[in-house]
Amino acid sequence: MKKTKGIDLSPLRDSSAYRRLYTAGFVTSLGTQATYVTIPYQLKQLTHSPLEVGSLGLVALLPLVFFGLYGGVLADRMNRRTLIVVLEVCMMGLTTLTLVNSLLHRPLVWPLFVLTGLFAAFSSLQSPSLSALNQVLVTHDMQRASSTLQVISRNTTSIIGPAIGGLVAVAFGPSYIYGANVITFCGSIFLLVGLDKNLSPTPTHEHSDRESFMAATSFLRGRPDIVGTYLIDLMAMTFAFPVSMMPFVAARYHQTYALSLLYCGLPAGALVASVISNWTHKVHFYGRAIAIAAAAWGLGIAVFGYSSSLLVKNGAVIQVLKCQALRNDCFSIMGDKFNYRITNQVEYSQIW
C-alpha cells in the first residue's frame, strides 16, 4: 500500500456525506467551544463567586453520567442521522435562550445552570451517534485517516473557539458569542439535514434498551483495567483541571487577552502532543502510561497554582494538555465496542 505523506484527505474527497458531516461538526464545535468558555466568564461577572462558577461542572456532570451511557444505547437502536439533527436543533434552542438571558438588563444566574445541564444531556446523547456515523460514512481502509481528521478538527476548533470566546466576551460581552453560536448551529443544521435519510437505517435488535445498557455495564465489571484507567482520568479532571477558574486567574493580570491566552494553552498542549505522538505506539502497558501522565498532569497543575507569571501559567497548562493527549492515545488503542459510550462521559468533563 502506498504511504501518503502529510494529511490523508481521502475521506473528504471520496465521500460527500462524510464531508457534510465533518464540516457540520467543525462549525458546531467552533461556536460551542467559544460558548463553553464564555458561560463561566459571564457567571463570574454576575456572581464573583468561585464556588458558583465551579458548580457549573457538577451541573454538567450529573446528566453526563446517565445520558452518556444511554446515548450509546440510542446510537445502536435509532436512526442516527435523525437523532443527531433533532438534538442539534435542541442545542440551538438552548443557546438561543442563553442569548436572550444575556440581553436582559440584569441577566439571571439560574438559567445558566439549567441550560448548562440540559446542554450537557443533549450533547452526551448526540456524541455516540456522531462517532458511529463518522465510521459508517467511510470505508474500512479510510478509518485511520478519518480518525486523524477528527483529531485535527477537534484541536483546531479547541484553539480558535476558546481564543475567540475569551477575547470577544471580555472586550464586547457574552451576548456576541452566544449570537454567533446560534448562527453556527444554523449552518450545521443546514448541512446535517442534507444528509441522506437512508445512510443510517434504524438498526433492529432483539434486546431492549435496558438490556443493552446492562450489557455495557456488565462488560465494564469484567474489565477492571479499563475501569481503572477511566477512574484515574476522571479523578485527574475532577480535582486537577480548573478550567472554570480561568476567569478568576485572568482577572489578576488586568489584560483583555489574558483569558483568551489561558484558554488557548489547553488545546495548544494537546496539539503539540498529537504532532509528536508517534512514539506512543511503542507503549504496551497502557494503564501505567495513563498513571504516569496523570502524575505529570498533577505536577503541571501545581506549577500553574504556585506561579505568578502569566506565561509560566500558560506553559503549565500546555504541559497538562500534553499529558491529557497521551491519555487520549492510550484510550484509543484500548478501544472496544463499548468504548465510545464511556469516552463520551470523559470528554465533556474536560470543559470544566
Image: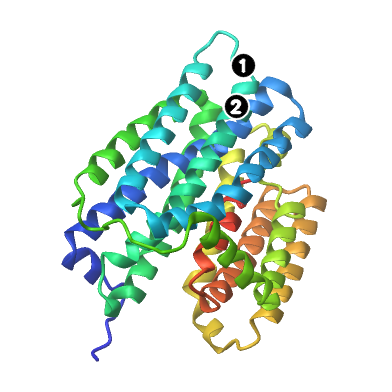
User: Is disc 2 surrounded by few (<14), some (14 to 19) or many (20+) residues within 10 Å?
Assistant: some
Please state which of residues 112 and 3 is positioned toward the viewer in this rendering.
112
**What kind of element bears circle 1?**
loop
Q: Position of residue 222 (x, y in %)?
A: 67, 77
Q: Nearer the viewer, residue 106 or 250?
A: 106
Name the residue tied to disc 1. 108
Element class at badge 2: helix
Task: Using the image, determine if residue 216 lies above or below residue 94.
Answer: below
Q: Is disc 2 in contact with disc 1, using a CB cutoff of under 8 Å? A: yes
Quadrant holding the C terminus: top right
Return the x and y of residue 301 as percentages of the image width and height: 75, 57
- Observer able to see residue 293: no
Q: How far is disc 2 from disc 1 in space, using C-alphas? A: 8 Å
Asked which quadrant contains residue 297, the reply is: bottom right
Q: Amino acid at mark 1?
A: Leu
Pick the front one: 70 or 261: 70
Q: Which residue lies under the disc numbered 2?
A: 112
Q: Is residue 197 visible?
A: yes
Q: Residue furthest front?
A: 206
Side of 138 relative to 71 (left or right): left
What's under tag 2, amino acid-wise? Leu
